[in-house]
Amino acid sequence: SSRLPWRGKNVLITAGPTFEPIDPVRFIGNHSSGKMGFALAHEAAQRGAAVTLVTGPTSQETSHPGIQCLRVNTAQQMLDTALEHLEAADIVIGAAAVSDYRPATVADEKIKKSEDHLSLDLVKNPDIIHSLSKRRKPGQFFLGFALETEKEAEHARAKLSRKGLDAIVLNSLRDKGAGFGGDTNKISFIDKNSELTPFALKEKSEVARDILDEIDRRL
Ligand code: PMT
């Protein structure tokens, strides 16, 4: 119906940070609150979609019946869980801030303070949205995010093509009120034809609406 235009669609969304353990009490993480991913999940569910939301550690909650919320900690767990739901998805959105590296080994016991210098050996994590897009089936739409601090549009376009996406949402830490943590964001939507649509600073709930409208236009 016109009130539920996404009824029958399956939407797979990653959200939040990942926590990569160092030892039983410490981890490598980042400032993602999960708000952007949860807002997208809520907006898609409001349009009638069946949403699978795979989220890293966050205090965000949802009770929307259209959202299946799956909580994970690490990038590897996020990938494994997303892969289980990829086949059924019509639209895949990578809003998570995934740790690009993880400690090569996780210490069994709490690491003791001793030397003045301590080095952590890190290994690369899988790229989740790229791993998913590599398994793309005809008709699936892949949207990534790009969180940039310089040469924003150039870096975002490079990520779009490197990760095999249909479009990418650029947000810049140079813009006040954009990116991590807060309730607002300022984005540009860039599609694979390199067309860039800028939006004003607004609530993440409204940003989610703009993003889904842009996807809709390209389905
Ligand atoms: O959670 P909030 O506090 O609301 O903040 C929202 C946000 C800033 C986290 C969000 O809007 C955002 O920009 N998410 C992507 C953050 C990011 O890590 O961007 P990136 O430029 O490093 O990654 C590019 C794309 O690849 C993203 O779609 C990311 O999910 C994906 N990626 C990155 C690395 C990796 N190992 N696997 C991935 O899937």
Image (tube, rainbow, N blue to C red):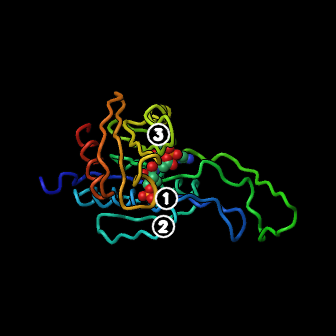
- Quadrant occupied by the C terminus: top left
Q: Secondary structure at mark 3?
A: loop
Q: Give the secondary structure at mark 1.
A: loop
In the image, which disc is placed on residue 92?
none
Depth check, front residue: 199 or 21: 199
Three-letter amino acid code at the position of disc 2: Thr
The residue sitting at 32% across, 37% down in the picture is 139
Whether the residue under disc 1 has CB within 8 Å of ligand 1: yes
Task: Give how far apart the Cα atoms at labels 1 and 3 are.
Answer: 27 Å
Q: Position of residue 101 (x, y in %)?
A: 64, 49
Q: Which residue is mark 2?
A: 58
Q: Which residue is mark 1?
A: 32
Task: Point out the frontmost of discs 1 and 3.
Answer: 1
Q: Residue at x 46, y 31 (%)?
A: 154
Which mark is first along the chain, 3 or 2?
Answer: 2
Which element is circle 2 on? Answer: loop
Labels 2 & 3 near each other (Cβ < 8 A): no
Image coords of residue 25 (percent x, y): 69, 71
Residue of label 3:
135
Q: 40 or 130: which is nearer to us?
A: 40
Q: Amino acid at mark 1?
A: Ser
From the Cβ of disc 2, is ligand 1 less than 8 Å away? yes
- Asked if marks 1 and 2 touch (Cβ < 8 Å), the reply is yes
